[in-house]
Amino acid sequence: MSQSSRWIYAVAFLLASAGFLVPLWPLSVAGVMLATLSGRWIFAVITGLLLDLAWGAPTGTLHFFFFPFTIAALLGFIARYYGSLYFLDKNPQEKI
Amino acid sequence: MMMILSRVSAADARAKRARFFGVVAVILALGAAALWRAPLSEVLWRTLTPVMHARFGSDASSTNTSSLISVTAERDALYQENLDLKARLNRDARAGRILGAVLLRPPATPYDTLVIDIGSDQGVALGDTVSAGGTIVVGTISEVYARAARVTLYSAPGQKYDALLRGVIPLAIEGQGGGSLQARLPAGTAVSVGDAALLPGIAGGISARVSRIERGDGESFVTLYFSLPADMLGLRFVEVWKQPNHVTE
């Protein structure tokens, strides 16, 4: 794991957990989005799932579909995927 | 050249395979979380308990204990007097009560539901009214197991029940979730913030209090917003009311 990865994981987790403890959900969203937009989407999805379980769920049908943080992580992943097709550097200097 | 190409394609294939397994793992994790959300939440909250105690304190409801005790004593005395007066008129309005402890509350359970530690073994039945103590009613029993039951609060989304505003004006109240409820009344009805909605019947019980009134210009109805009379997140014990004895001697 590179040094930058360590920093990203640490900051993303700190933001997500701080958002839960304050509580201020936009901080948690920022943590999840930081992880997923930087390419750590599995970590982002796991964090999102944990946050969704911790925040709870409404009754009724939404009980099975209400996963806002996980959905945010997946949307971030999709955004990064399509962003990388058009905007991000597909041949970074260090891999040439 | 061929070797480089085959290496690149092998790496591509590995990346594709990893992505495929990643997507499958995410779908499985989401499915498991959707199906077993309540037990998973429970496990998570048990794990988080020390952290939450450190952050929010172990018992936030311990403030103003003395005033709470005196108010509760006064209420109990008035309630007893009410029952005695009804008994003098040969009407027994006492409901059989079973005390239960709250095992799980939101967010470890779906919003506006509780899990309590008494069930059919203790005589709890589907549809029994649940009170937070005294005459403060908060919901009904929606699922019964041998030694546990699920309480759906009146404020759960989609829950509808009939009530009497100030014990007089009939209205249908609908749960909105998060301890909030809503009802509509004709615009000319006299209503103010703090009015109580009572359950119809001899046992009665306060089920909600008006927290806000929304009057639109020229509209023929007003929208009333209610809140539960008890804090569902602070409940430790509840009472399950068996149907009151309506026998008139």
Image (cartoon, helix red, strand yellow):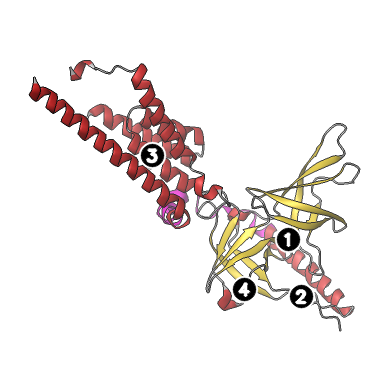
Q: Position of residue A3 (x, y in %)?
A: 24, 28
Q: Which residue is mark 2?
A: B94
x then y, percent, for residue A78: 40, 29
Q: Residue tagged by mark 1?
A: B71
Residue A92, located in which quarter of the rendered image?
top left
Does the magenta-highlighted stretch encompass residue B162? Answer: no
Which residue is drawn at the image coordinates 46% and 50% (left, top)?
Answer: B34
Query: Front-most of A68 and A87?
Result: A87
Q: Amino acid at mark 2?
A: Arg
Label 2 or label 1, whichever lies nearer to me, is 2
Estimate the spatial distance between the alpha carbons at disc 2 and disc 1, rounded to whole Å: 21 Å
Q: Is residue B214 left or right of residue B178?
A: right
The residue to which callout 3 is attached is: A45
Prevailing SS of the magenta stretch: helix
Residue B194: numbered disc: none
Pair 4/2: label in front? 4
Give the secondary structure at mark 4: loop
Sooner in the amino-acid sequence: mark 4 or mark 1: 1
The span shown in magenta is B41-67
